[in-house]
Image (cartoon, rainbow, N blue to C red):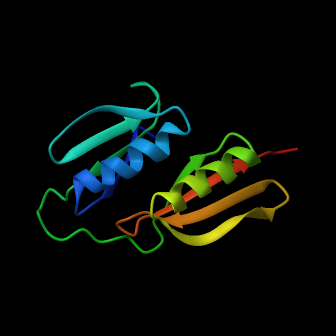
Amino acid sequence: MLGYTTIGTKDMDRATTFYDALLGEVGASQLFGMDRIKFYGTSMDQAMLALCIPYNEEPHECGNGNMVAIPGGDRAGVDRLYAKAIELGATDEGPPGERMPVFYGAYVRDLDGNKLCFFEMKMG
């Protein structure tokens, strides 16, 4: 259903250092890009996350209510992603924990203030 999601940055070098290390934890890497945009994923036929310097060259702003959710695989994976993000300089928005019977999640803000969720969801 999703092709890719784009989030903004004001410092591409800093953002790529953060996301190279963070997304490497789930087997993702930079697949392609150019100076102002970089695409991360596990393959070109799967959903991707793109980092970009805004095309209009206006300052980057985080959208209120916008969030990128990254599957952790299992609870240990969620915990690992959360810890890695904090180690890389992200700020806490909600530590790992069960939010409802089918959802275990953790929340951070990346170095530019974009909100990320690491999650495991199990139905039934």
Q: Residue at x 48, y 71 (%)?
A: 65
Image spot of residue 48 (x, y percent):
41, 38
Seen from the viewer's position, the closer of residues 84 and 45 is 84
Query: Is 36 situated left or right of 8 in this image?
Result: left
Residue 73 as seen in the image, left or right of residue 17: right
Q: Answer whether residue 1 is visible to the viewer in this image.
A: no
Q: Residue furthest left?
A: 57
Give me the residue at 31% from left, 47% from top.
Answer: 16
Q: Quadrant of the C terminus?
A: top right
Judging depth in this view, the residue of 56 and 33 nearest the camera is: 33
Question: Which of the 4 image quadrants contains residue 82?
Answer: bottom right
Q: Position of residue 25 (x, y in %)?
A: 55, 39
Residue 84 in picture, x, y percent from top left: 55, 53
- Total labels: the figure holds 0
The image quarter in which residue 112 lies: bottom left
Determine whether 16 is above or below 11 in the image.
above
Q: Residue furthest right?
A: 124
- Tell me if residue 112 comes above or below residue 75 in the rendering: below
Q: Is residue 59 left or right of residue 46?
A: left
The structure residue drawn at horizontal position 47% and vertical position 29%, both measured from the top left corner, is 42
Which residue shows up at 54% across the image and 65% down it? 108
Examine the rendering and report whether any part of residue 122 can be seen.
yes
Q: Residue furthest front?
A: 87
Front residue of 5 and 41 = 41
Residue 32 percent location from the top left of the image = 27, 31
